[in-house]
Image (spheres, rainbow, N blue to C red):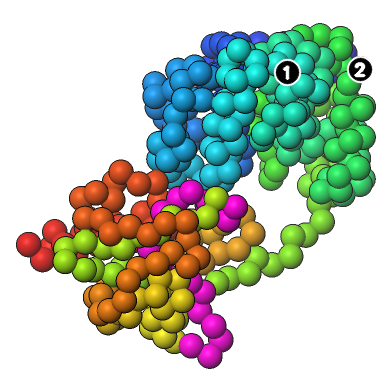
Amino acid sequence: MSFVDHLLTWYRQSARNLPWRRTRDPYRVWLSEVMLQQTRVDTVIPYYERFLSAYPSIDALAAADEQSVLKLWEGLGYYSRARNLRKAAREVAEQHQGELPNRYDRLRQLPGFGPYTAAAVASIAFGEAVPVVDGNVLRVFARFWAIEDDIRAPRVKTQLFERLSPFVRQCDPSHFNQAIMELGALVCLPKRPKCEACPLRQECRARIEGRQGALPVKSKKSATPHKEIAVAVIWRDGQLLIGKRKVDQMLGGLWEFPGGKRRADESLEETAIREIREETGLEIELGAPYCTVEHAYSHFSISLTAFRATYRSGEALPHSTDELRWVRLDELDAFPFPTANKRVIEAIVAQHVTKR
Ligand code: SF4
């Protein structure tokens, strides 16, 4: 038996029963693949189910407003995925009668369809013989074929795509691609791969040569920078001020408390007062912090300190946001916020409950 036969037999016996594996509906496959990028399966399942109840079809998603889509995505991170999903749904509704194109090269033309998503949807939903190459696939084959190149190098992805193409053509492309990704998720783990349970063990060069720990070769990421952020929760007549981030910014379309990055020569309090002046034109009186939240993004981490503040003077104008709004505390739940700001809201609510 070839390694492909071993792999597919293992997949039939070992595949996890996940909601998106019970369908080949292109919309559901697409949604699951987008949600699973950089995100764990356990985290995705409830989001996937909630999203489908709200938007059961591409046409329903196309008709949705961006804020509602972002609200459903809240906490899942990488929000451009949600914005692109909706954008692509609108394009599919307008130009393709609500049906996703059934070929890799045509899918690639839609917003948010990189090589990975297009290959996953084309192969899983439409059976097109095109390999997916994600982090799991790179790791498995870097070990299986003892590839010595740095797997972060784009050429390695391209080479693997070409090398895998003939194998995908020999079998059901949907099963082949899912089987490799599943093997990477369950067996060929980054640390301590479970070689004794692996269907590829007989031909795997890394296992035969005892080099599982040395492969794949991966260049080190440079150290992630850390930023100190100060924001102000500005109260005025029982309402507080929130701003909507510009669409072309990271976390675009989400809401936040105004503030920004501390400069080297400033205290956090000075940062908050300066940022509020620059971002909104308001003068404030700063109180004690509600909390400090630590949060890590893919390329940097932050410590975000949220100060209680009282409005003093000025008219709130959105100098660096799309919009500013005064809202009541009990209205905040209607807006999508990034995770660190959600923690701030929890701290505000907790303080208000204690004070009652
Ligand atoms: S034998 Fe071990 S190293 Fe090779 S593919 Fe399987 S789990 Fe990975």
Q: What residue is disc 2 on?
A: 166
The spot of residue 105 in percent (x, y) is: 81, 23
Q: Few, some or many C-alpha atoms within 10 Å of disc 1 (few <14, some 14-19, many ≥20)?
A: many
Residue bounds of the magenta highlight: 248-266
Q: Quadrant of the C terminus?
A: bottom left
Circle 2 sits in a helix, a strand or a loop, which is it?
Answer: helix
Residue at position x 82%, y 56% in the image: 219
- Viewer-closest of 78 and 19: 78
Q: Few, some or many C-alpha atoms within 10 Å of disc 2 (few <14, some 14-19, many ≥20)?
A: few
Which dot, 1 or 2, sits closer to the camera? 1
The spot of residue 81 in percent (x, y) is: 58, 39
Q: Residue type at mark 1: give it.
A: Ala
Q: Relative to 233, does residue 181 appear above or below in the rendering?
A: above
Q: Is residue 98 left or right of residue 295?
A: right
Q: What residue is disc 1 on?
A: 122
Q: Is residue 237 left or right of residue 200?
A: left
Q: Is residue 55 left or right of residue 345?
A: right
Q: Can you tell which quarter of the image residue 310 is in?
A: bottom left
Q: Main secondary structure of the magenta part?
A: loop
